[in-house]
Amino acid sequence: MIRAASALVIGLVLVGCTPSVDSFSIHRFWTDVGNHWEFPPLDRTVRNPAIASRLYEEIRALRPPTGTRFCAIDFGVRHELSFFSGSTRVLHGIMEMGCGTIDLGAGDVRTLDDRIESELLGALGLYTRGHDLWPTPVPRP
């Protein structure tokens, strides 16, 4: 009985510690300074608590990569994704275009899936073909 009550109290404390995420921001940047491609800029903040908290929970639920991963051609494009509770950043990650992963720091890398990309595109108001989150590079003249 005491163990069950203790487990319940610990569970309630942990649930109470989960931040109330109310917004997220995304920023596209390049790691390859000699990039020969042009990508449209992307700097957005979404201030919709329902969307932000759902995306936050889905990212937290992603699994680490397993086995050997094939990474497509990488043009050095990265997306910085930050989740906020008020003005406090509660989660920060770097999404890698070629490998389909998000690095949450301290060695915590997770594998992205189509659901996350679809949720993110919908939250940003982007269509999944054409003006994508992962745009097709256009060579510079």
Image (cartoon, grey):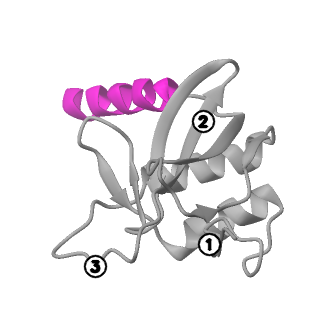
Q: Which mark is residue 119?
A: none
SS under mark 2: strand
- Please give left or right for residue 54 compared with residue 69 in the image: right
**30 is within the stretch colored magenta:** no
Q: How far is the residue under mark 2 from the one under mark 1?
A: 28 Å
Question: Closest to the observer: 20 or 7?
Answer: 20
Q: Amino acid at mark 2?
A: Phe
Quarter holding the N terminus is top left
Specify which label sits upstream in the sequence, 3 or 2: 3
Q: Which residue is mark 3?
A: 70
Q: How far is the residue under mark 3 from the one under mark 1?
A: 20 Å
- Residue 104, given in percent of the width and then of the height, sits at 38, 42
SS under mark 1: loop
Q: Amino acid at mark 1?
A: Pro
- Residue 50, given in percent of the width and then of the height, sits at 75, 46
Residue most toward the top? 87
Q: Amino acid at mark 3?
A: Phe
Q: Which residue is mark 2?
A: 83
Specify which label sits upstream in the sequence, 3 or 1: 3
Q: Main secondary structure of the magenta part?
A: helix
Q: Are marks 2 and 1 in contact (CB under 8 Å)?
A: no
Q: Quadrant of residue 119?
A: bottom right
SS under mark 3: loop
Question: Closest to the observer: 46 or 80?
Answer: 80
For residue 129, above or below residue 3: below
**10 is within the stretch colored magenta:** yes
Q: Which residue is mark 1?
A: 137
- Residue 121, given in percent of the width and then of the height, sits at 72, 64
- Residue 120, given in percent of the width and then of the height, sits at 67, 60
Question: Closest to the observer: 133 or 120?
Answer: 133
Mark 3 closeness class: few <14, some 14–19, many ≥20 residues within 10 Å: few
- Give the foreground label among 2 and 1: 1
